[in-house]
Amino acid sequence: MLLLPCFWRCPAGVVKLYFPKILLLPASRFSLSKEPLLYASVYLFAVTALASPVTYDRLAASERHGRDLVLALDTSGSMAESGFDREHPMRRKFDVVISLVKSFLKNRHDDNIGLVLFGSFAFAASPVTYDLAALQEIVDTADVGVAGQSTAIGEGIDQALRALSFSHAKKKVIVLMTDGYQNAGSVSIKEAVEKAKRRGVKIYTIGIGKPKDYDAKLLKKIADETGAKSFSAANAEDLKEVFEELDSLEPSPIRSHTMINRRPLYQWPLLGAMILLIGYLSFGGRVRR
């Protein structure tokens, strides 16, 4: 860009070199035209294009305010029972849960969420992530029996704790949803709860269905010992209210990784240079003639 003044200074210097007495000649013949401005503009656009300007689009804020949360869903055979939703009696309990989980995720813009499915065993269907759109798709693939027909609550908690072990959030939460009793798994509930207490993880428990269908006392004990709260949802309406209450959990600062999308912009100044050159070649020559 430092060479831009040459488009005005250099031509005048050349004229003076060949015509030392330029003041004695007609001014119109040797007056500087608007061509230097045109050349300088083309030069400016070309140099800008060669500099390869780019823009960066930050897809995730450097500071997020929310919590690290893992949803632990019971996928045992009993979750296939119908009659849980009064408006749609044929819908399975699991279908109602999945529908409400997806609605819950839509409002969690600042949360880092993972998904654990448990039945006869437990596994992490999704690590703790900010990519809630991808998590929604994973939730859609979950179904009854994907982890067996029994209920391993202890393993469900243990896998949720493992998912949270990579977290740096100050507040970590597990939301455990089940409609049965512990009847499978190699990890005891007591052992898993003690681990959660040592790590400062709250476990909110939700009993799905009639109180006799699940161990309500055990779920309340799990929540109480970890400083959380236990809920019961006898039907779809109750479960919806539970999710609304969970929606008011206090956030904590979380630092996210910044993802950057690089987009080149060289084509725009290059296009400007081409338009000026084409315009000059098309109309500049005609005016001279």
Image (tube, rainbow, N blue to C red):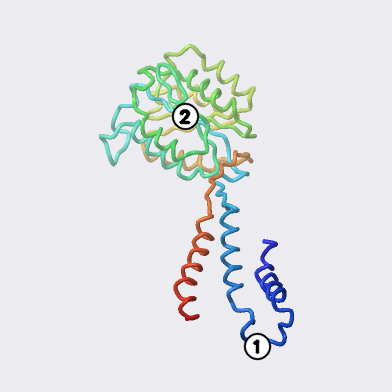
Residue 26: mark: 1
Residue beneath the point at 40% across and 22% down: 180
User: Taking 62 as reference, is 214 left or right?
Assistant: left
User: Taking 88 as reference, is 64 left or right?
Assistant: right
Placement of 18 over or under 151, stated as above or below: below
In the rendering, at what x and y percent does residue 45 appear?
Answer: 57, 62
Residue 106: mark: none
The image quadrant that residue 144 belongs to is top left
Q: CA distance from mark 1 to mark 2?
A: 82 Å
In the rendering, at what x and y percent does residue 265 appear?
Answer: 53, 54
Placement of 183 over or under 1, stated as above or below: above
The residue singled out by tag 2 in the image is 126
**What type is the residue that disc 1 sits on?**
Pro
Foreground disc of the pair 1, 2: 1
**What type is the residue that disc 2 sits on?**
Ser
Q: How many marks?
A: 2
Residue beneath the point at 64% across and 22% down: 198
